Image (cartoon, helix red, strand yellow):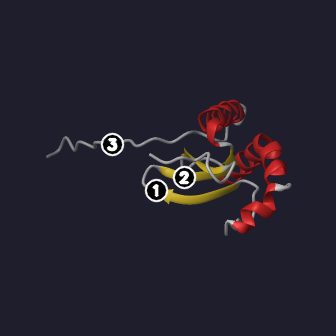
Amino acid sequence: MANYTSGLGYLRNELPVRVTFESDWQHAKKLLTDLAIELTEEVVAEASGPNAERDRRLLIHYPTLTPVVYTSVEDAGVLFTIRYLCRPRQRRGSAEALWERILEAFAGSPSIEFAYPTQRLLVDRSE
C-alpha cells in the first residue's frame, strides 16, 4: 500500500476512455481535454503556487501540470487516456466527476460512441 499524502499534496490519476473507430475521434479528444482542464483548473493553480518550490527540492519535475489526453489504438477502438492532477483523497471523486461530465458530453455528441470489447461470429451456412 502506498501513502500518497506524505511529501506531495497531489498525484497524477489516469482515466481510460474508449470510442469506436467510426466516432469523430478528434472531436472526442477535444471534449475530453476541455473537460479535464475545466475540472482540474483549481488544483493546477494550487499546485503551481507556493508548493512548487518544495516540489523542486524533492526533485519532482512535471513538464506541465495541466491535463494531457493520450491517444492510442486498440482492437476495440480508439483509446484515450486522460492524465490529470488531483488531490490524493479526492482521486475517486475527481474520476467520478470527470466521468459524469464525459457521459453528458458524449450523450450530446451523436458523432461519438463508446467502444467496448466485442466478438463477432460469422457462420457460413454453405459449409
Task: Name the residue that disc number 3 marks.
Answer: 120
Of 109 and 56, nearer the camera is: 56
Q: Is residue 12 visible?
A: yes
Q: CA distance from mark 1 to mark 2?
A: 7 Å
Q: Dividing the picture into quarters, in which one does residue 41 lie?
A: top right
SS category of the residue bearing label 3:
loop
The answer to whether 33 is drawn above or below residue 110 in the figure is below
Q: CA distance from mark 1 to mark 3?
A: 16 Å
Name which residue lies at 69% across and 51% down: 29
SS category of the residue bearing label 2:
strand
Q: Could you tell me residue 68's position as x and y percent?
A: 69, 57
Of the numbered discs 1 and 2, the one sitting upstream in the chain is: 1
Question: Are discs 1 and 2 less than 8 Å apart at CB?
Answer: yes
Task: Name the residue that disc number 2 marks.
Answer: 79
- Asked if residue 127 lies left or right of residue 27, the reply is left
- Classify mark 3: residues with Cα within 10 Å, few (<14), some (14-19) or many (20+): few
Name which residue lies at 13% across and 46% down: 127
Give me the disc on residue 74.
1
Which one is closest to the eye, mark 3 or mark 2?
A: 2
Q: Dividing the picture into quarters, in which one does residue 103 lie?
A: top right
Of the numbered discs 3 and 2, the one sitting upstream in the chain is: 2
Q: CA distance from mark 3 to mark 2?
A: 20 Å
Question: Are discs 3 and 2 less than 8 Å apart at CB?
Answer: no
Q: Could you tell me residue 8's position as x and y percent?
A: 67, 53
Of 55 and 79, nearer the camera is: 55
- Classify mark 1: residues with Cα within 10 Å, few (<14), some (14-19) or many (20+): few
Q: Dividing the picture into quarters, in which one does residue 109 lie?
A: top right
Name which residue lies at 64% across and 32% down: 93
